[in-house]
Image: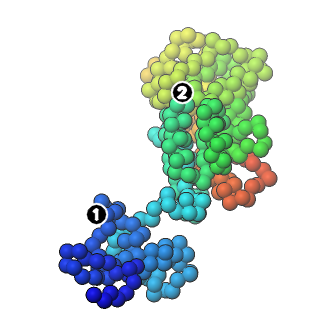
């Protein structure tokens, strides 16, 4: 029997005992399992697999007619590129791993919005990991994400476990830290001084005439502890520090917890004339507790928070707080990471975005 055509262009239909074009061939094993491959696209478009790959990755290298055939095959089959295979071929995955401690906290959703806007233009995909303020969870998520061969990593904060540091060093991918500033000027980081922010808002209370200032802290992550140290330093400078007016718990920060902790603070230090809450939600709870008890704010007790969440300006009374540049932190950190990935390492690697004291009715 005479066979015409090459084996690359034809296949045997064993049931009908004759040859047919590959484009008419039955679905491959991968398609029978539900996954469409590049070979399926090539078969549908009646081109070689290498040609289909070139039409996708370098469309300028093929004719318009051929490119349109491949694009039509992609639409017909619902093909999705195999990112892992492409990253192996190009040494780039176009994936950025982002580790944040909470997905419910508005602080971090604002950061993620900035990251997404900065990375969209570069065609990057974002892998988000929620560490839940846990070193063990951060280690696990980083290990999983590094298997995707990310081009870079965005981390929250500066304090990582030794295991995380080892994994990052071994991976050799660029890393940018967010929300705080390291002492090392060579470390890539975008944020502001948590210590200085805590110092500034405490100094504001001192200038307003308050002297018996308490501190309410929750979660006790590294940023909260630095704010607390700024609070202490401002009071030490004024000769007013009293550790009996500090109340720190490891519970997650919530409005309900703020109300509870304000009650505990007044029970253990009833002479407090002001309270610095490490987060705005704690400050909201503290104000609600004052209202329930008939405690005038700020006439009897001043209350301030941290982060300037949207409700802070609309509380009654409106809340004095520190406005943090959360969106800009995410945007600038992602932009800095893109530059590092592309080999455009800036001279300034430690970007201080600062913060703003929002003095309102609660103080």
Q: Position of residue 107 (x, y in %)?
A: 54, 41
Q: Quadrant of residue 216?
A: top right
Q: Position of residue 21 (x, y in %)?
A: 32, 82
Q: Residue furthest front?
A: 1
Label 1 vs label 2, nearer the camera: 1
Residue highlighted by disc 1? 32
Residue highlighted by disc 2? 219
- Residue name at image x 57 percent, y 18 percent: 247
- Residue name at image x 32 percent, y 67 percent: 28
In the image, 172: left or right of 21? Answer: right
Of the 4 image quadrants, the one containing the C terminus is top right
Give 240 or 114, whichever is nearer the viewer.
114
Q: Quadrant of residue 194?
A: top right
Q: Position of residue 281 (x, y in %)?
A: 51, 32
Q: Position of residue 295 (x, y in %)?
A: 51, 20
Which SS class for mark 1?
A: helix
Whole-angstrom CA distance, mark 1 to mark 2, is 50 Å
Tag of residue 304: none
Which SS class for mark 2?
A: loop
Vertical placement of 19 versus 277: above or below? below
Give 110 or 158, whichever is nearer the viewer.
158
Is residue 37 in view from this perspective?
Answer: yes
Identify the mark nearer the N-term, 1 or 2: 1
């Amino acid at each position: 029997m005479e066979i015409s055509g090459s084996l690359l262009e034809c296949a045997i239909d064993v049931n009908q005992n004759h040859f047919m074009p590959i484009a008419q061939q039955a679905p491959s094993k991968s398609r029978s399992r539900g996954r469409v491959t590049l070979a399926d696209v090539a078969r549908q478009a009646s081109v070689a697999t290498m040609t289909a790959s070139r039409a996708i990755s370098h469309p300028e290298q093929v004719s318009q007619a051929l490119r349109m055939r491949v694009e039509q095959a992609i639409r017909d089959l619902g093909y999705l590129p195999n990112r892992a295979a492409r990253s192996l071929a190009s040494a780039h995955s176009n994936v950025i791993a982002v580790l944040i401690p909470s997905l419910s906290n508005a602080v971090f959703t604002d950061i993620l919005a900035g990251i997404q806007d900065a990375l969209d233009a570069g065609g990057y995909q974002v892998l988000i990991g929620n560490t839940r303020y846990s070193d063990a969870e951060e280690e696990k998520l980083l290990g999983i994400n590094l298997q995707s061969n990310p081009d870079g990593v965005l981390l929250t904060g500066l304090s990582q476990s030794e295991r995380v540091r080892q994994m990052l060093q071994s991976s050799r991918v660029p890393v940018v830290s967010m929300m705080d500033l390291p002492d090392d000027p060579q470390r890539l980081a975008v944020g502001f001084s948590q210590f200085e922010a805590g110092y500034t808002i405490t100094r504001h209370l001192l200038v307003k005439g308050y002297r018996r200032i308490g501190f309410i802290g929750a979660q006790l992550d590294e940023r909260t502890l630095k704010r607390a140290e700024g609070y202490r330093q401002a009071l030490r400078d004024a000769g007013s520090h009293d550790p009996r007016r500090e109340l720190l718990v490891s519970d997650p920060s919530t409005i309900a917890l703020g109300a509870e902790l304000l009650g505990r603070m007044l029970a253990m230090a009833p002479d407090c004339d002001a309270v610095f809450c490490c987060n705005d939600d704690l400050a909201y709870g503290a104000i609600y507790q004052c209202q329930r008890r008939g405690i005038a704010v700020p006439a009897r007790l001043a209350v301030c928070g941290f982060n300037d969440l949207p409700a802070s300006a609309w509380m009654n009374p409106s809340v004095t707080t520190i406005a943090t540049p959360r969106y800009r932190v995410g945007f600038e950190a992602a932009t800095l990471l893109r530059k590092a990935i592309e080999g455009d390492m800036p001279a300034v690697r430690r970007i201080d975005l600062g913060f703003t004291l929002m003095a309102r009715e609660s103080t």
